[in-house]
Amino acid sequence: MAFVRNQWYVAAYSAEVGRALLARIILGEPLVLYRTSAGQPAALADRCVHRHFPLSASQLDGDTIVCGYHGFSYGPDGRCVAVPGQQRIPRTARVSAYPAAEQDSLVWVWIGDPERADPGLIPRAPWLDDAGYTTVRGMEPLAARYELLVDNLLDLSHETYLHGGYIGTPEVADTPISTEIDQEQRVIRVSRRMDNAACPPFYAQSTGIGGRIVRWQDIEYYPPCLYVLHSRVAPAGVLPRPDGTDPDGFHVEVVYAITPSTETSTYDFWAVARDFAPGDTDVSAFLHDSNRTVVLQDVEALNMLERVIAAEPPGTQELSINIDTGGLAARRMLARLAEESACLPAPVP
């Protein structure tokens, strides 16, 4: 599948972007990220126009990156402001500058025509920056195409088999899903409710719930980059409120930013925000380590799957079933977005 351009992608957590130069590759494009003296994130192409030395291996002087090879210097807008040994700066001495925005403790970059970079299009994950939630987070590189991670996250039945002992129980695979595709808002929703499920260690040890539970998994995927799992648990037998809405319980917002790096590599940003035990560092450490273990299990499986797919003969078919409804809808939506971005005029340099 072609990359989806003219979209916002997560390049880093806010805490990662500072006065040190940070290198990332997004949609095959090497970027250097930093924060200006005014605190604004900046993103430039990570290669000097002179001899293509990586700017991420250079120095920051004020708001200017000074190339560590020959001293060409660039402002946050990508324009060259100094050339060694001469006063005249060549007209073409500039690097691409990518629109950058900060929202919900994430730094987003726009890969495409900068004239279309509307920050209002960035999907929200407000729990990550909400004082009412406590968040643990991380990022794991994936040696596999990003579509495999989209498939993985939209079909959580794999929790039963791949993540048993952490987050998976038999009920996840046994419970049917409901799927909703909102073409206008470009969001895919997949939901599952388990009324009498075993409580996996992920929740038993973090909430203190014992015995059977009611468990909700409500997924929202905003192609191409943002995935949110609204996860709730409550003791089994807890009845809905009089108005028919779900009862109070323990709420966890699991957020993934799925950022393609190259055709066969992905940045897997993950975060777990909870509304319980806010000051409990032991719970935070447990949820961090448990979720990272789950993510690494996915990484191992998807890296293996990427190698299998790469070795398959052309025309090899796969089988899909009911649980794949959300993933198949995501594939179609991503294909349409890629086609739309390919049809747009190229930006003027």
Image (cartoon, rainbow, N blue to C red):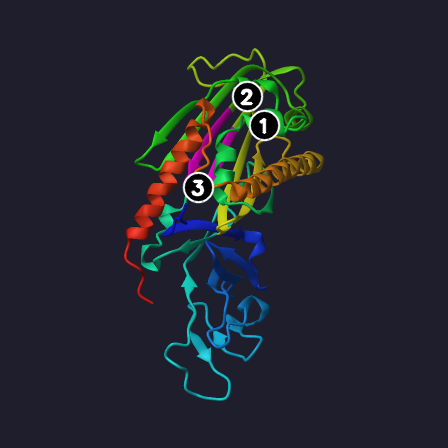
- The numbered mark at residue 124 is 3
**Three-letter amino acid code of the residue under disc 3:** Arg
Q: In the rendered structure, which amino acid carries the disc numbered 2?
A: Ala
Foreground: disc 3 or disc 2: 2
Question: Three-letter amino acid code at disc 1?
Answer: Glu
Residue at x 36% of width, y 38% of height: 333
In which quarter of the view is residue 327 placed? top left
Task: Examine the structure image and report whether residue 305 is included in the region drawn in magenta.
Answer: no
Q: Nearer the viewer, residue 343 or 282?
A: 343
Which span of residues is magenta-colored? 217-230
- Of the pair 75 and 200, the residue shown nearer to us: 200
Question: Which residue is depicted at the point 54% across and 52% down?
Answer: 14
Q: What residue is rendered at 47% in x and 61% in y?
A: 43
**To which residue does mark 1 refer?**
159
The mark that comes first in sequence, 3 or 1, is 3
Is the C-beta separation of discs 3 and 1 under 8 Å? no
* Whole-number angstrom distance, CA of label 3 to CA of label 1: 25 Å
